[in-house]
Structures are given as C-alpha cells and as structure tokens.
Image (spheres, coloured by chain):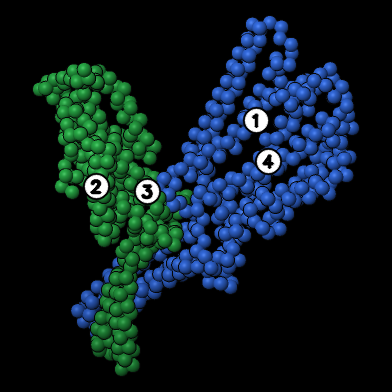
Chain colours: A green, B blue
Amino acid sequence: MATALRPIGHEDRLSIVDHLDELRQRLIISLLTLVVAFGFCFWQSDRLLDLVNRPFENAQANNAESATRDGGALQQSARFQKQLGDALEAVGPALAGVSRSLDGLAAAEGASVGAQTAVAASQERIAVATAQIREAAAAVPTDTDRRPVTLGVAEPFTVTLTVALYGALLLSLPLLLYQAYAFILPAFSPHERNVALPLMAMVPVLFILGVAFAYFAVLERAVTFLQGFNDDEFDILLGARDYYKFAVLFMAGIGVLFQIPVGVLAVTRLGILTPKQLRANRGYIILAIAVMAALVTPTPDPVTMLLAMGPLILLFELSVLLAAWINRAKPPPEPDIDEQF
Amino acid sequence: MATAVRPPSLEEGMEDRAAAALGQVKSRLTKAFIGVALAFVLCFWQQDFVLQTVNRPFETAQDTIAARGAPGGDGGALQQAARFNAEVGGALRSVGPALTSVGVSLEQLADAEGVSPAERARVAQAVARIEVAVAALREAAAAVPTDTERRPVTLGVAEPFTTTLSVALYGALLLSLPLLIYQGAALLVPLLPRPSRTIVVPLLALSPVLFVGGVLFSYYQVLPRALAFLQGFNDAEFDTLLRARDYYSLSTLLMGATGVLFMLPVVILGVTRTGLVTPRQLRDGRGYAILALAVITAVVTPTPDPITMLLLMVPLVVLYELSILLATWVDRLRPPSEDADGPGADPPAPEAKDL
C-alpha cells in the first residue's frame, strides 16, 4: 500500500501487470476515500442540505423584499398571517385594559351587586380569551421560507443521496486528484514534471475557490433572478431535484472555469505561448471568457455574468503576471526540443 | 425551380436565375425572421399581458370547479385555508368596531361622577390600547389574501424565465403568422402556373383568418371546458396543482390544432377548384367526412368527455357544409374546367409533384 501511494520514479521500468496492479490499488484507495466521505456527508446530510439550501433561502428573502406588487396567493397568505399575529398581539392588551377598567368602574361607588357579578364574570372570560389570544399570537408561523419541493415517492431520499454524493466528491477531490496524478506522473520527463507538479497542486485549490465563489457570490443572485421572474403570474415552487442539479452544475462549472491560471501557466511554461503573446491577444481571451461565463451562468442578465467574469479576468491577468515573473526568473528552456533528440 | 422545367437555354442565364432565386429565398427568410423577432420582442415586453391572457382559461376553469364543488364537498386543504382566511378577515373587520364601542362606553362610564382620577387614567389607558388594537385589526383585515386564484406552478430553477420565453415565442408565432404565410406564398406562388395561382391566392389569404378564428374559438370555448373537466376531476382526492410547462404546452397544442382544423374550408375549396373532387361528391360523402371529423376532434381534444369533442366538432361540420356551399357557388360562377383549360394546364401537375 505504501508504495501505491508514492508515485513511481520516471526511470523505473514496470511491466504492464505492475501498472495494472498499481492502478487497481489506486482505484481501491480512491473508492474507499469516496465511500468514507460519502458516509460522512450522508450522516451530516441535514447540515449539508441546509448549506445547499441557503442560497435559495436568501434568494427568497431578496425576492420578498423587492416584491413591489401584492405577490401571489402564497406570499399574500404569509403576510396575512403575520399581520393577524400582530393584531392578536395588540388585541390581548386592549382586552386586559378593558378588564381592568371594568374592575375599577365596578368598584366605584354606586355600582349594583348585579353589575359587580357581571363584571367579575366578564373579567374571568376576558382572562381566558387573553390567554388564548397570547397562545395564538405565539403560534403565528415564523417559518415562511419555502423549501425545495419533492414530488416523487422516493425523492426526499434519492435527492439526499445525490447531494451527499456530490458533497463527498467535493470533499475527496484533493485525494482523488492526488491518486490520479501519482499514477500519471511517472510518465512525465523530469522537466515536464517540474512544470506539471505545481500546476497539478493548484487544480483542487482553484476548483474549491471557484466553488466557494459561486456559492457565496453568484448562486444567490442567479436564483433570485430566476425564481423572482414574473412571480405575479406563477405560483413559484422549486423542485428539489432541479434545484440541486442546477446548484451543483453551476458551482462545478465555475470551479472548472477557475482553472484558467493552470492553463495559462502550462502553455507559458511549456513554451507554447509567451506571456507577451497572451497579453497582446487579451481582447480575444476576454471575449472567450465572456462567452464561457455567459454559458455557465444560466441567467440572461448581465449582472450575474459580469460577476462570474470579473474574477476570471482577474485570474487571467494574475496568471499572466505570474508567468512573466517566473519566466524572468527561470526562462522556459527549449528542452522540449533537446529532449526529443 | 421554375427554370428546371424549362429546357436550359443558356448556362449563364440559368446561373443568374438560380442566384436570383436564392437571393429571393434569403430575403424572404430574413424578412420572416425579422417579423418573428419583432413580434417576439413585443410579446416579451408585454409578457404580463400575454401570460395573463393565456392563464385566463385556467382561472375560468378554477371558478367553474369552485362553483361546482361549493355545496357538497369541503374542498382540499388549499380551498379550506382560503375560505378560512376570508372568514377570519370578516371576523377581524367586525371585532374592531366592537372594541371601539366598548372603549366609548368605558369612557362615558368613567365620565360619570364618583369615579376617581386613578380609574379615569386606567380607562384612558385602556382606550389608548384599544385604539392600537383597532389599527392593527384594520391592517390585518386589509391584508386578507384577495388573491385566492391558483396560478400555474413552476418547479424548475429557471422555469419562470424559460416558460415566459416560450410563451412569448408562441405568441410571436401567432402574431406573425399572416406575415409568415405571406412570405411563404410570395416565394412559392410565382412558381405555380398562372391558372392555379388564381385558385391558390384567395385560399392563402383565407388561411390565416381561419387559423386565428380556430385559435380564438379554442381559447374561448374549448380550453376552459377542457381544463374544468381535467383539473376538476376527483379534486377531493388530489391536491390539484397545474404545472406551468404542462399547461402552456397543452393549451398551445390545443389552440394550434384547432387553428389547423379550422383551415378545412381551404382544403375543400382547394380540392374542388382544382377539379379533384366535385362539391356533389363531397355532399354525398358527408357521412364519412363527419365520421372523420369526429375521429380527428376526439384525438385533438384532450378530454374524453363528449361535450368538449362535440363543441369542437360542430363548428367543423358547419365549416364543412359552408365550404361545400361556397364551392358550389363558385363552381356555378366559374366551372373549374375553365381554369384547367389554360395553356399551362397539363404541366402543373408534375410540377407540383416536383415541389
């Protein structure tokens, strides 16, 4: 096992069976990791789902705020319940005040015995009513957030499984990538390895950065726009399966787009393109980034697209700078040609 | 394509003509596309109106269902909640005045002699609280959901948006239909031999009118009934929600199909004017024609009840009879043989097949 975890040296000559053996071991390790991560995610699935649902909840809050018109039946009834609770809360003290005033008035001179018993009876009833009103006001639904809707018999279960699996993939991504690299790396020449190794280390970091960026900055806006569209004309519910698929695709897409620096550094370090060339063709590259950002962000509004595009351009510029700096420190040799001969 | 029939005289001329034909196709396509795009922009801009229009049969159907279900069953949880909210609103509206008058009574009682200032202060406090409560009650009563209509439900993340887009597109197609037919006709009619042109052009002019007539008939008459039947079916056993995507595809299909069926007179006039069938034959075959219409309407209407089917079938039969009458009348004015006697009478048949 220990040997399986370390990459094999470039100079080692292995038979095909040895390679297959290594592959099997690496696959088993990857699978085990995934299973453990999946178990963890499934165990904590309520927290995981809370986490994934949060952008949707925030989007609902945004849409409720920006709702200018009277909203649909669902929003109206939520608002009515809140107002009803407020009214009940105000009615309680009013009744209590009435009760106390009646008491005082009855105690004043000149009240007959009959009046005093009537006042006592009404005080008792008011006390009961006040208690019930207080209970009712306390029971006003505070949780007006809608949650993703499931419609299938097994959907709550299968959707949880799917989300746990995606979570497990994200959690175990670094280890899975390490296993893949360790298997491939021996095929690289020492020079190629010097280029590839830092880039490979960057991949999971950038991917997770992209996912985090999508989760915190973009997803909420996208869901706000899409779910708030024409909400006067539709009763907008959100199917759980659809939402999780959308969220996962979206986050993974941005995670992949965040790999731009890896691409830039790879082509510059391998001497395919110089940083100067990249800088000269900046216009085309920004256009390509814009197209990709537009494809990944599912909303047609320019704000979400620009939001996704900004960091991508920043990453591009930063990696060109980095590439230029590395090239100055260590110019990319032309060993590609040297080594081939 | 017209050149293909004639013997090629000069290759250059052929090429020129082919280029001209292609250019014409391109310009017609461009115009049609621009027309659809403009109509789409208009429909998307007025999306509220378009969606409200398309939702109206559903709302009508809901009213029908609600009216039918009122006396007997207690409806589902959704209907009960709506009724409860309305009743609570009524109660709130009457509690406010009751409290106000209690406050007034208390004040007047306190004004009587022999009430200590402390008691008066207490009454004043109670009256102040009553005012607060009445204000809150009034607000709550105003917030009673007025909108108890259910709307088509969206479930996908992007469904509100994509549904709006597709409805706007359908609307745009309907709006630009006359233009589309005109562009298609302007492209194809010059290829027809002159005598059949006189038959085809009026028919083409008739077709958008008939199509829109069919769509309107379906929208006002068939769709609300079909929806009331389908959505009201066993509604005590289901929470019946209507998915937006489903609703729009069903209503568009039904309206489109009715529109196409309403173009029946075009077909009948076409076959009688070209002399394929005489009006007399059509009249003799009436039984079969009505049977065929019954089968087609049964397939097109999504409900298995005979009422919706008959509703769609009756105007079709009327259209059938009317167009036979019209064909007879036109034939009497100008017998079809006269048209077919023209110089290009025989070539058009194979040419039409070529197209």
Query: Circle 1 — which element?
Result: helix
Q: Are marks 4 and 3 on the same chain?
A: no
Q: Which residue is mark 1?
A: B181
Q: Look at the image and tell me in which quarter the C terminus of chain B lies.
A: top right
Q: Which of the two discs, 2 and 1, sits closer to the camera?
A: 2
Q: CA distance from mark 3 to mark 2?
A: 32 Å
Q: CA distance from mark 1 to mark 3?
A: 42 Å
Q: Are marks 4 and 1 on the same chain?
A: yes
Q: Which residue is mark 4?
A: B260
* Mark earlier in primary sequence (4, 1): 1
Q: Which of the two discs, 3 and 2, sits closer to the camera?
A: 2
Q: Which residue is mark 2?
A: A25
Query: Circle 3 — which element?
Result: helix
Q: Is residue B251 visible?
A: yes
The amino acid type found where label 2 is placed reads Gln
The numbered dot on residue A245 is 3
Query: Circle 4 — which element?
Result: helix
